Amino acid sequence: MSSNLCSRCIYDANTPGIVFDVEGVCTFCHLSEQLEREYQTATAAGESRFQELVQKIKRAGRGRKYDCIVGVSGGTDSSFLVAKAVEFGLRPLAVHYDNTWNSAIATENIRKVLGKLKVDLWTYVVDNREMDDIFLSFLKASVPELDGSTDIALAETLYRAAARFGVGTILEGHSFRTEGVSPLGLCYVDGRYIASVHKQFGRLSMRTFPNMTLWRFLKWSLLYRIQRIRPFWYLDYTKEEAREYLSQEFGWQYYGGHHLENRMTAFHHSYYLPNKFGVDQRNNSLSASVRSGKLERAQALLEYARPPHLEDDLTGYVLKRLGLSSAEFQEYLNRAPRSYRDYPTYKGTFEKMAPLFAWMVRGHLVPKSFYVKYCLPDVKCSSPV
């Protein structure tokens, strides 16, 4: 067994922030164990703790049409979460951020699931030219976070919906047991980073893009007291069982892999990161599945050795939408890699505010993963990202 590879998962020595103990077990395996103990994940105690949260959500939402917000993308996690919310007796409002790059499968999945559940949908659609200009800005900036703006815009959209409809809780479909906690050096995004990259490389003004400044983040969290709760951190959740359930109950269709329900996100993970930065983020979910016992380590390594799934003609579609020739696109790919450290961000501010955010984690005002990734000191890595 290579000393450069974790003895338990498939992370290697190039993973930013990784440290191996005397038995060769990596930092992120220990972090996962810590989270499982803290949230009592997939145990009767964890289920009980989450049911207590459900009762609090119901009490807080009395007299209102909705008592929680659930973001939906048409993917496995969000589709299953909205179904579970209804099963728990909650009254969710489904919220969708449309960056205009949705796949047809994802759009149809949303329609099927919400239609049968009779759950209302509130959608925010950004201007497509503006969105493409932001994506092109990050391509020109030569940084890994080509699709990072989607994460910020989704979070801001969920907060806006919660404030608009008087809802105090956002349920999020993340599971560290199936997705892991992505190392900071592999991806970073905040509202200041998006604005600074776009100001330098963009052409259009950001009029409709729902960016989230630090002030807005604190307003939603501290003034509006909007909580963000991740049910799958408490419950026994597996993607395979969720997909089977969704398929049988709603005619939901699988789209080929994690993050592939959106065409820009799929391009980002399956083509851009591997080809420009030598980064294949499937190791996050594969390692998480190994840690949780859902996948044999040898099988995960074999899967990781295969090229990522890439939709036919996806690269051509992306170039056409962004107005790029093959030569122009190749020139951007050949540019020296840069990182978020080369542009203004909130990272230093987050680190200074770490005690506040630690308190906010305890009140479910920010996820624990935000604190771990953004508020602890930055760890530079040996790879370009």
Image (cartoon, rainbow, N blue to C red):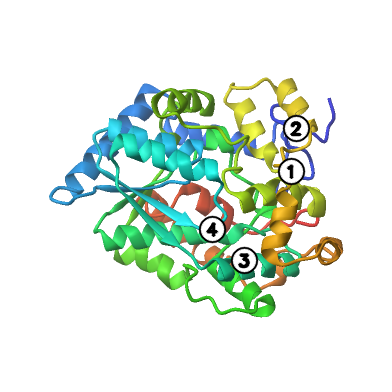
Disc 3 and disc 2: Cα gap in Å? Answer: 30 Å
- Mark sitting on residue 132: 3
Q: Position of residue 95 (x, y in %)?
A: 38, 52
Reading the image, the residue beneath label 1 is 280
Reading the image, the residue beneath label 2 is 304
Q: Amino acid at mark 3?
A: Asp
Q: Position of residue 67 (x, y in %)?
A: 24, 47
Q: Is residue 203 left or right of residue 247?
A: right
Q: Earlier in the sequence, mark 4 or mark 2?
A: 4
Disc 2 and disc 1: Cα gap in Å? Answer: 8 Å
Tell me whether circle 2 and circle 1 mark residues in contact (CB < 8 Å): yes
Q: Earlier in the sequence, mark 4 or mark 1?
A: 4
Q: Residue at x 25, y 42 (%)?
A: 91
On screen, residue 100 above or below 137: above
Tell me whether circle 1 and circle 3 mark residues in contact (CB < 8 Å): no
Q: Amino acid at mark 2?
A: Tyr
Q: Residue at x 40, y 42 (%)?
A: 111
Q: Residue at x 74, y 57 (%)?
A: 380
Tell me whether circle 4 and circle 3 mark residues in contact (CB < 8 Å): no
Q: Residue furthest left?
A: 63
Reading the image, the residue beneath label 4 is 100
In front of the other: 55 or 211: 211
Q: Amino acid at mark 4?
A: Thr
Q: Dividing the picture into quarters, in which one does residue 328 lie? A: bottom right
Q: Residues within 10 Å of mark 4 (few under 14, many from 20)?
A: some
Disc 1 and disc 3: Cα gap in Å? Answer: 23 Å
Q: Is residue 225 visible?
A: no
Q: Position of residue 360 (x, y in %)?
A: 39, 56
Q: Dividing the picture into quarters, in which one does residue 129 lie? A: bottom right
Q: Earlier in the sequence, mark 4 or mark 3?
A: 4
Give the quarter of the figure containing the C terminus: bottom right
